[in-house]
Amino acid sequence: MNLLFKKIFYLLSWGLISVPNLYCQSNDSLPHPINTNKFSVTANFIYNYNSNKNINSISYPLGKIPNSTSGDSVYYMQYKNIDTKSFGLNISYNKRIAKKLSFSFGVGLNQKKEIKNYVTYIDSNNNKPDLIKSTLIQYSGFVPLRVNYYFKRFIINFGNNFGFFAYSRESAIFQDNSRKMYTYNSFFIKTTFQESISFQLFKNKSLYVSISAEQTGKFYKSDGYNNWFMFGVAYYF
């Protein structure tokens, strides 16, 4: 009787200890519910933040702007950069590499704006009206590479955007309300950093909202459009 009792006790003890462990191991090996191999499309509203709110003063002793695409000449100018708004779109493929980790890559297009309002503009040609405003709009193609971490209904990711192409259009408005337009293309390799947090709006659904920040390597500088803040909507399929 004692032998039978011991066998039953050992069997129950093994079951109480081993079965939960086996269940936990099996559960840990499963992927996070939203971490699967799939594509995603993200549309972003971009806030182009300029970190210098002061008036900039530049003088050109020779009366020419070096490397100017417009060919304009000026002795002295004062201008102020302002914050602008634009948009972006990208598509990526998500590849699961662990239960809560994945790697994603894709292709995207961002529109970014730079606006200068001129306070003073002394042109070397007295017959030309002064410049009062210039707007640069750039459409840039890039490859996003991200590492993603999954926590409950959140996706936290970080990585690089590798820019490779840009189409730029610059418009200039002069004091007499005349306008000039300049366009140019460029191929380049430019790297920026981006961090994002996405939240699954509805459980078991593939729609997410996200907030992101993108910076150049000069994001800590006190001048220039080195920071871009984004609010986006993403759909996984």
Image (cartoon, rainbow, N blue to C red):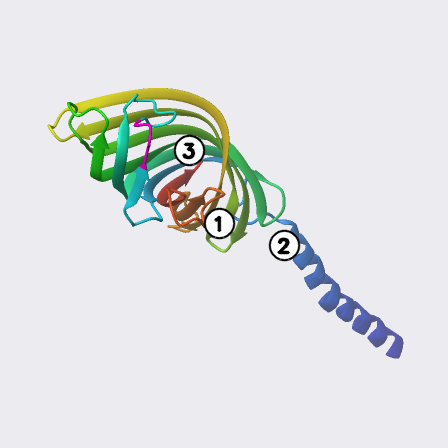
Residue 153 or 127: which is nearer the viewer?
127
Residue 175 coordinates in the image, percent (x, y) = 13, 31
Residue ID at (28%, 21%) = 182
Q: Earlier in the sequence, mark 3 or mark 1?
A: 3
**Furthest-bottom residue in this view:** 2
Quadrant of the image occupied by residue 123: top left
Question: Which residue type does callout 3 highlight?
Answer: Asn
Identify the residue under disc 2. Answer: 27
Residue range (magenta): 59-63
Q: Secondary structure at mark 2?
A: helix
Give the main secondary structure, helix, strand or loop, of the magenta stretch: loop
Q: Specify the label residue 155 is tagged with.
A: 1
Q: CA distance from mark 3 to mark 1?
A: 17 Å
Name the mark on residue 194.
none
Q: Name the residue at 28% across, 41% down.
A: 84
Q: Is residue 226 visible?
A: yes
Query: Horizontal and vertical percent for residue 219?
Result: 45, 47
Find out whether the residues at labels 3 and 2 contact each other: C-beta distance under 8 Å: no
Q: CA distance from mark 3 to mark 2?
A: 33 Å
